[in-house]
Amino acid sequence: MTQVIVIEPNKTLHELISINLSAFLAVDIIERQNAADAINLLSILPSIELVILPSKIENEESAIVLIDYIKLNKLKTNLIILGGQRFFDEDFVQSIPKYADWESVILHSAKILGIDPEKLKPKIGPEYFPVALNYFYSLEHTLCDVFIRIRKSPSEFQYIKRIHKGDEMTAGLVEKYEKQGLQHFYITKDDYKNFTTYLSNQLVLKLEKELSDQKDINKYIKLMGESYDIATHEILKLGFQPESIQLTDSIVHSMVRNTNSTPVMANLLHKLINSKTGLLFQNAHMTSVVAQEILKKLKMSQMESIETIAYAAFFMDIMFADYEELLKINDREEAVLLLPEQRDLVLKHAAIAHELVLTQPALPIGVGQLILEHHGAYDGVGFNHRIDGFSDLSKIFIIAREFVLRLILFKERGGETRPITDELYKIYPAPDMILIIKALERSLKKTAN
Ligand SMILES: [Fe+2]
């Protein structure tokens, strides 16, 4: 029997990969803790065909250690590397950029081991879709049956109905499952679309209700973040549907209202960057806040401009919904170090998002253009700092985005505490950009005016 070494510190992912490898490819799984352990085994069993591992385990550069060992000893072992952004060009290495993408692991393993991946597809296609538990806190009822998944045998899962269609959902009920360590409920494939529609509608109602008796802005921001996550994934999966459009409108209006109801911009930025929400949402909301404040200082704050900017901020990086970390890449030099698939996504994300928003004509005119130019490239491909011929709105949007990205990076990496605007003056020395940066500086003053 073919033997495959699987190194994966995350127990659930390890299990998922191992179960499916043995079920679909009938291979024998050998578990190892790290690359050093795997090398001990390879030294006595050099014929092992495949090792699956993350790029790094604690302080060990696991992928590099194994690549060097295989090269040095001229082994025929292949590697599948999970996660990590580094590109390896050795032909025995297959990188999978998305860390938990176990389905790709199975497909690539099949290819490496000479099994036709096409034959696997029907088996892998899921009948049940996972939905993170926290979304159920937003529901009062379910409109479809809800299942939990348990392991039936080493190679099979069983789905057990725990909540019936129409049953009342309470926070206590969801919490009970959460305490048992459950992370997902499951919905059948047939119910999934209706479920996301229903969930979106519930979120819209909740957002509006919480807004009317808004006591705790932090709670409200968290709800907005969850809604953003649902809306962006739904749009990417199903295109613009009435319910995702409605949810998007609600979130964008909430972004504008949050900005208007917080007199000191820095306070809102502080709350957003420290909120328990995704990076993509924080980046979108903060960009809209900063741009809106610059518009005010420049006396350009007509409602149409504010809305155009808020929608553009919502959609500009939507293509990174499953790869949030990529929004931190801000120049070509960094982008070329990525895996080819990610590099392409980074370089073209503005152009692709622009295409996407063109399919929704109800958006304010000008949203697409802001998205296309948000990294300074007129065609939405790559990065550029030349902004000749861009509209004022586009220039403001670029400054707001550049500022927010530096805030995010500073929070994560620390560094010198000199004003971010100093750097912006250097990158954008044109007189009209200086006026915008000065307006930004006035917005940053810790008073309302
Ligand atoms: Fe971007």
Image (cartoon, grey):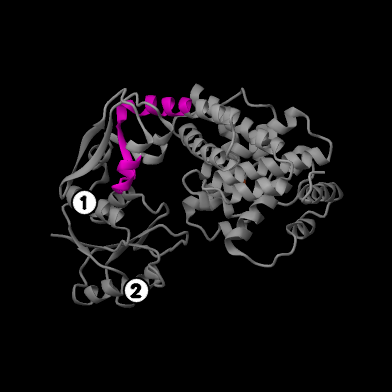
Q: Please indicate whether residue 150 sits to the left or right of residue 1 in the image.
A: right
Position of residue 258 measured from the top left corner of the image (x, y, whole percent): 65, 37
Q: Tag 2: Cα neighbours inside 10 Å, few (<14), some, or many (≥20)?
A: few
Seen as rendered, the residue at the extreme right is: 431
Identified at 74% across, 32% down, the residue is 305
Q: Is residue 153 visible?
A: yes
Q: Is residue 193 magenta?
A: yes
Q: Earlier in the sequence, mark 1 or mark 2?
A: 1
Question: Given the image, on which type of amino acid does mark 1 rest?
Answer: Ile
Secondary element type, mark 1? helix
Q: Nearer the viewer, residue 5 or 111?
A: 5
The span shown in magenta is 175-202
Q: Quadrant of the N terminus?
A: bottom left
- How far is mark 1 from mark 2, CA to CA? 30 Å
Q: Nearer the viewer, residue 96 or 12?
A: 12
Q: In the rendered image of this protein, does residue 339 appear above or below residue 193?
A: below
Our reading of the magenta stretch's main secondary structure is helix
Position of residue 53 measured from the top left corner of the image (x, y, whole percent): 33, 62
Label of residue 19 in the image: 1
Q: Is residue 214 magenta?
A: no
Q: Quadrant of the C terminus?
A: top right
When asked about the image quadrant of residue 260, the answer is: top right
Question: Given the image, on which type of amino acid does mark 2 rest?
Answer: Lys
Q: How many marks?
A: 2
Position of residue 184 measured from the top left corner of the image (x, y, whole percent): 33, 42
Label of residue 71 in the image: 2
Identified at 40% across, 40% down, the residue is 134
**Marks 1,2: beta carbons within 8 A:** no
Q: In the rendered image of this protein, does residue 359 appear above or below residue 425?
A: above
